[in-house]
Amino acid sequence: MKKSNFVALTLGTIGVVCFALGMCMALLPEWGMFQQGIVCGVIGLVILLITAAVWRKMEGKAPIKLNAKTIGAVAVGVLGALLLGVGMCMSMVFGKMVLGIAVGLVGIVVLLLLIPLVKGLK
């Protein structure tokens, strides 16, 4: 395994765990940690953005240009991930199985629609 892939895998795992834990903290009312969950989720997103920048640098690729298309792609990705997480919480925690599956599927479709956007950013 290349060093750049290992670094991206490690940082990406840390970022995803922070983001997922933050979503759980924010969406589970029994935990009473909404604000802390938002902070943890944002930290996870920042780590994931840093991961992308570090990986591109280690691969010798040009830095990501911040323009409307890039920001839109990130926003769509975050929206899709949030919808998927909300759908999972609705299904597993709140007992609203059908609605949770529907929301989760919408999140997956949003993430699938993101693929052409990301390919256009290369």
Image: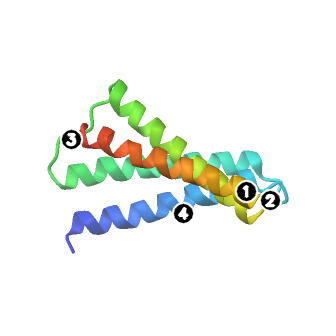
Mark toward the viewer: 1 or 3: 1
Q: Is residue 13 above or below residue 115?
A: below
Crowding around mark 3 (Cα neighbors within 10 Å: few <14, some 14 to 19, many 20+) is few
Which mark lies nearer to you, 3 or 2?
2
Rounded to the nearest angstrom, the CA distance separating label 3 from label 2 is 40 Å
Among the two numbered marks 4 and 2 on one chain, the one whose residue lies closer to the N terminus: 4
Q: CA distance from mark 4 to mark 2?
A: 22 Å
Q: Secondary structure at mark 3?
A: loop
Identify the residue position indicated by label 2 in the image: 94
Q: Which residue is mark 4?
A: 17
Q: Amino acid at mark 4?
A: Val
How far separated are the C-alphas under marks 1 and 2?
5 Å
- Looking at the rendered structure, the secondary structure element under dot 2 is loop
Determine which residue is flagged by label 3.
122
Going 56% across and 58% down the picture, which residue do you hit?
Answer: 18
What amino acid type should be assigned to the residue bearing mark 1?
Met
Are the residues tagged 1 and 2 within 8 Å (C-beta)? yes
Measured along the vertical axis of the image, is residue 120 above or below residue 47? above
**On residue 1, which mark appears?**
none
Q: Give the CA distance from mark 1 to mark 3.
A: 36 Å
